[in-house]
Amino acid sequence: MLTNGYNTYNKMPQIIDKPTFKTSPQSISTKFVSSTPGRLRLRVAHSHRQPEKMQRIANALSANSHITQVKTNVHHGSIVINHDGKDGSLENVLATLKDLGIIFADVSEGNTEAAAGVSSAIVDLNQRVKQVTHGAFDLRILFPLGLASLSVRQLFKKGLQLEMIPWYVLAWYAFDSFIKLHGTNQKQSPNE
């Protein structure tokens, strides 16, 4: 029994050696720009283009025995990885990237902080609309439907008015946005 420094004996808490639980690193979105034998080029998402993060990635990659050189460009978010090109070295590099928390996704060039904020706000609004309508509607159907109803209203209220063009412009936008919002993405990420 351990004492607490006083005359009374109390049980003192003991430190028990517990296994350390490693938390997975924060995922970093990247995109394959090019992959040639012995060379891999990645583009890091705009939100992760801090010099500290890029340097941490470069240092971790340089520790891999299959990697001969790592170059980073923080401004463009580019990481160029030169590896020995032998059998299994690319898989080893990809496993190292995965261990660092790097995920391969479609990283667009022009996403700024403002664009990412607007995009996340719209995604949040879309989820709320889905919850309110119990999954029956979302913004992908409501937005084109709203434009279509505006075009029909303009058509009934003002007639054809071919010289002004507003009703069928709205009708075209309704159709075009419906097609774009419901289009399928044929691209698949290289890690699938």
Image (tube, rainbow, N blue to C red):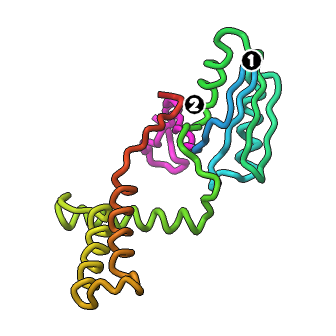
Q: What is the span of residues highlighted in magenta in the rendered image?
A: 1-27
Q: Secondary structure at mark 1?
A: loop
- Above/below status of 147 relative to 82: below
Residue furthest out toward the front: 162
Left or right of residue 160, residue 80 in this image: right
At 50% across and 42% down in the image, what residue appears? 3
Using a 10 Å C-alpha cutoff, classify the residue at mark 1 as few (fewer than 14 neighbours), some (14 to 19) or many (20 or more). Answer: some
Identity, as a three-letter code, of the amino acid under mark 2: Lys
Location of mark 1 (residue): 66
**98 and 90: which is toward the camera:** 90
At 33% across and 60% down in the image, what residue appears? 178
Give how far apart the Cα atoms at labels 2 and 1 are. 15 Å
Location of mark 2 (residue): 98
At 61% across and 18% down in the image, what residue appears? 91
Identify the disc placed on residue 27.
none
Whether the magenta-drawn stretch holds residue 33 is answered as no
- Above/below status of 85 relative to 9: above
- How many numbered tags mark residues here? 2
**82 and 52: which is toward the camera:** 82
